[in-house]
Amino acid sequence: MARKGYCLLLISRTAQKLDKVKAEIVAECPNCPAVKTMAVDFTLDSIYKTIAEEINALNGHVHVLINNVGMAYKYPEYFTKIPNSDKFISDILNCNILSVTRMTHIVLPLMEKRRSGIVINISSYSALFPTPLLAMYSASKIYMDYLSRALHAEYKDRGIIVQSVLPYYVSTNMIRNPGISFMIPSPDQFVSSALKTVLPGAAR
């Protein structure tokens, strides 16, 4: 009997966009067993009880977690000059740091029971060095990278891979869709290359 693939739970802020992605997946992969969506705002810290309940309703089976939620500056700016800075500081820390920590904390016990699982955390090239005028963004991304590497070391002997992905430019809305070139791949091109590195024992 042919394997049908994974059931999917898509979590993001906008229900309309989630429904669009769901329709695209169902159209392209008609044998996918199920695609669920859940609209939540990751700038809030009150969402994780609801998310955990939804995930635990999957009978405790989570094979892959992809932490790809994140936010960036609208434009480079000095730390004290960021518009609406009190809210922005809370939002970017919740979205870029708390989200990956809490989501991983929810699924790791489920993977540990099965002694298998993959966690893919989408960090950023900016994690490789401090980035003036994008200080909190680059700091949040090195947190994700260090967390991923440390957790991989903790859990690799239990059959769990934690991968940190540090993309440079990819043609997405976050960088205002600059177009595709030799140096700027499409999302499909980047994902195809990145997935080839998810191998047993690979730390990143």
Image (tube, helix red, strand yellow):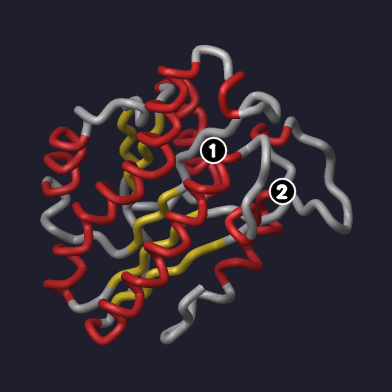
Q: Which residue is labeled 1 in the image? A: 24
| Amino acid at dot 1 | Glu
- The residue at 24%/60% (across/down) is 62
Asked where in the image residue 99 lies, by quadrant, the reply is: top left
Q: Nearer the viewer, mark 1 or mark 2?
A: 2
| Amino acid at dot 2 | Val
Give percent across and percent down for residue 67. 41, 50
Asked where in the image residue 147 lies, by quadrant, the reply is: bottom left
Badge 2 local density, few (<14 within 10 Å), some, or many (20+)?
A: many
Q: Earlier in the sequence, mark 1 or mark 2?
A: 1
**Disc 1 + disc 2, Cβ < 8 Å:** no
Q: Is residue 129 left or right of residue 139?
A: right
The quadrant of the picture occupied by the N terminus is: bottom left
- The residue at 71%/36% (across/down) is 175
CA gap, disc 1 and disc 2? 20 Å
Q: Give me the disc on residue 170.
A: 2
| SS of the residue under disc 2 | loop
Badge 1 local density, few (<14 within 10 Å), some, or many (20+)?
A: few
Give percent across and percent down for residue 101. 30, 51
Give percent across and percent down for residue 52. 16, 43
Which residue is at the far top? Answer: 84
Which residue is at the far right? Answer: 182
Asked where in the image residue 125 lies, by quadrant, the reply is: bottom right
Give 77 or 91, whichever is nearer the viewer: 77
Q: Is residue 78 above or below residue 48?
A: above
